[in-house]
Amino acid sequence: MSTRQAQGRPYRVELSSAAQRDLRRLPQEVQGRLETPILALAENPRPSGVLKLRGEVRTWRIRVGPYRVVYDIHDDQALVVVLTVARRSETTYRR
């Protein structure tokens, strides 16, 4: 199995309860702008510009303007779990 795609099938994208809460708190316009890149993770969980977070085994982040989408990739389950969505700040990457 390739680590880039689980045997040619798309990944399932799930939002953690924290990510759902983060999105609900954002303006509708921003939610719409974030929807496409988040859903695109199903086809390519490691798009151009993605960064792996240091000190984490499977946690990555993408930039969407001033916002960051932090997520885990579970290649063995073909699953992407969005952990948090936040405007870039000092606490964006803290767990």
Image (cartoon, grey):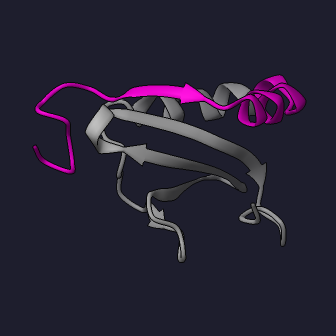
Residue range of the region highlighted in magenta in the rendering: 1-29
- Quadrant of the image for the C terminus? bottom right
Q: Does residue 24 show up magenta in the picture?
A: yes
Q: Residue at x 37, y 30 (%)?
A: 42
Image side of residue 41 versus residue 38, left or right: left
Judge whether residue 12 is colored magenta: yes
> In this orientation, which residue lies closer to the viewer: 52 or 63?
52
Residue 46 locus on image (x, y percent):
35, 52
Residue 83 relative to residue 62: left or right: right
Residue at position x 77%, y 62% from top? 92
- The quarter of the picture where the N terminus appears is top left
Depth check: give the residue in front, 45 or 17: 17
Residue 27 position in % (x across, y down): 86, 29
Note whether 2 is above or below 12 in the view shown. below
Tell me residue 36's x, y (percent): 51, 29
Residue 29 position by quadrant: top right
